[in-house]
């Protein structure tokens, strides 16, 4: 039988545990938690009334920032500059994946 879907509160607890284990709220979308988080950001982006009044504040209480730029340590411009420098050094854009991300 299919597992019962987790409640919103269970997902919030899972997000807290992820942060404790990984030091970040960035969860890959391939993870079911990452997909849930994507859905929460979508509701936030749509300014869904029910979400904005009941759930967004609870996520913010645990330190989650809905502005993705605040969750990202390095800006897009900084990464682009790194890419330009990599090409200058190596003559290509074949940047190797960090360990464990292949």
Image (cartoon, grey):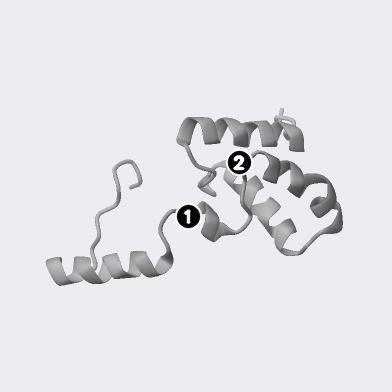
Q: Residue at x 81, y 59 (%)?
A: 48
Nearest to viewer (mark 1 / mark 2):
1
Residue 43 in sight: yes
Quick one: label 1, few (<14), some, or many (20+) residues within 10 Å?
Answer: few
Q: Position of residue 61 (x, y in %)?
A: 69, 41
- Label 2 sits on a secondary structure element that is helix
Q: Residue at x 29, y 43 (%)?
A: 99
34 or 44: which is nearer to us? 44
Taking the image as shown, residue 31 lies to the left or right of residue 57, namely left
How many badges with numbers are in the image?
2
Q: Is residue 80 above or below residue 13?
A: below
Quick one: label 2, few (<14), some, or many (20+) residues within 10 Å?
Answer: some
Q: Position of residue 35 (x, y in %)?
A: 61, 48
Residue 7 in sight: no
Q: Is residue 4 above or below residue 37?
A: above
Q: Quadrant of the N terminus?
A: top right
Which residue matches tag 1? 72
68 or 9: which is nearer to us? 68
Residue 43 numbered mark, or none: none
Taking the image as shown, residue 34 lies to the left or right of residue 21, namely right
Q: Residue at x 16, y 72 (%)?
A: 88
Q: Earlier in the sequence, mark 1 or mark 2?
A: 2
Q: Residue at x 35, y 46 (%)?
A: 101
Residue 33 numbered mark, or none: 2
- Determine the image quadrant of residue 70: bottom right
1 or 39: which is nearer to us? 39
Asked whether the beta carbons under mark 1 and mark 2 sit within 8 Å of each other, the answer is no
| Residues at marks 1 and 2, CA–CA distance in whole angstroms | 18 Å
Q: Position of residue 23 (x, y in %)?
A: 47, 37
- Label 1 sits on a secondary structure element that is loop
């Amino acid at each position: 039988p299919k597992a019962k879907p987790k409640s919103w509160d269970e997902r919030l607890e899972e997000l807290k545990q992820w942060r404790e284990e990984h030091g970040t709220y960035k969860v890959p979308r391939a993870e079911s938690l990452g997909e849930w988080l994507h859905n929460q950001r979508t509701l936030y982006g749509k300014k869904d009334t029910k979400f904005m009044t009941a759930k967004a504040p609870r996520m913010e209480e645990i330190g989650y920032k809905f502005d993705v730029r605040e969750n990202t340590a390095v800006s897009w411009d900084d990464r682009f500059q790194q890419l330009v420098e990599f090409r200058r050094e190596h003559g290509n854009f074949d940047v190797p994946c960090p360990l464990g991300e292949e």
